Image (tube, grey):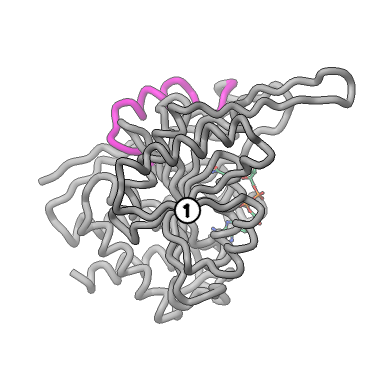
Amino acid sequence: MRNYSIAVLPGDGIGPEVIEAAIKVLDAVQKALGSLRLELKFGEAGYNCIEKYGTNVPEKTLRMLEETDACLKGPMTTPEEIGAPPSAAVTIRRKFGLYANVRPCKSLPGVPSLKPNIDLVIVRENTEGLYFGKGFEVSPGKGIDIRLVTQDASEKVARLAFELAMKRKYHVTCVHKRNILRVTDGIFRNAVYRIAEDYPSVILDEVHVDAMAMRLIKEPEKFDVIVTTNMFGDILSDEAAQIVGGLGVAAGANVGDNYAMFEPVHGSAPKYAGKNKVNPIATILAAKMMMEYLRELEAAEIIEQAVVKVLREGKVRTYDLGGDSTTQEVGEEVASKIMEII
Ligand code: NAD
């Protein structure tokens, strides 16, 4: 029996519902395979914790994460008041050195997609850039936010992008804006080119971020792995999520050298909280990415196959895909397909 300890943070808003559906799928995978055991440890994090603990990531949750192999995280409402703690995801990324954000974007059957053959991954530097968190008001009405880019962090994320390309279509596109951000994007771009020397079989090209925003619409099928800095990656990955069907099916991983956290790309969608209405597929695909990270490739494969089957049949689907099924019905349907596949 292969055992893993998994931290589960249901989060805010629709978080607990989509996590509940994803857990149904993970339960089915364990039952179907018989050789895999996931010990789920539930923890508190998110906006809901601030009143009780004075922070959105309580110390005991951080300690719990340290004792686990990976984390499945639901969406969390970001506090926006001045002086409030940063988003829970940012805190966890910093604490565990999760320097790469990996967001696959793939056309799925039965999901409206700009083109039928999109299969790309955006790898975004996750710890610095404009999200470094240092900004100040120089004088009333005049502010500065600092954009930090280091060779070290850029090389790390570049290496991860090349390793991923080696398992895919051997093509990396470096996205930057070096013509304007000469210092910081110069460092980033040069780091990617330096790491490319270790991967001679991978084709590397470069595109300015504004052109990339356009080409993602015009010819998304031409890309494989896109590597970029934090804010460019944040924006482009939402654009890429939209061209393959929207936030309801987009998952992401935050990866470091010793730990990783998996989450749907979408937020806590407060207006749908408790309505059992939103699409859990993004969270189910995040759980699938977690299985890949744990090298449980069979488990990952059957989750993906089950999701594809449910989407292809199109009988059980949530409102965003034109259906009226509930969040839990979709989770149950994917779980039942897993039992059929095995
Ligand atoms: P959101 O992603 O929560 O929701 C925007 C809209 O997208 C929703 O109103 C809904 O129409 C749709 N949507 C989102 N998830 C869906 C799903 N699973 N199925 C179907 N439709 C779905 O974005 P927002 O309203 O801008 O953010 C709400 C809160 O979430 C904010 O506090 C934001 O900062 C936070 N947020 C958190 C994360 C995270 O935890 N990683 C990510 C993004 C936003």
Left or right relative to 165: residue 59: right
Residue 317, magenta (yes or no): no
The location of residue 70, given as percent across then percent down, is: 32, 38
Q: Which residues are magenta?
A: 54-71
Nearest to the observer: residue 249 or residue 215: 215
| Quadrant assignment, res 100 | top left
Q: Residue 216, how many percent across, how many down?
A: 57, 63
User: Can residue 90 be seen from the camera position used here?
Assistant: yes
> In this rendering, is residue 15 above or below 49?
below
Q: Amino acid at mark 1?
A: Asp
Report the residue at 59% width, 31% height from top: 184
Q: Residue at x 73, y 29 (%)?
A: 81
Q: Is mark 1 within 8 Å of ligand 1?
A: no
Q: Nearer the viewer, residue 134 or 322?
A: 134
- The answer to whether residue 164 is left or right of residue 129 is left
| Label 1 Cα crowd, 10 Å radius (few <14 / some 14-19 / many 20+) | few
- Residue depicted at 34% across the width and 57% down the height: 170
Q: In the rendered image, which residue does mark 1 sit on?
A: 205
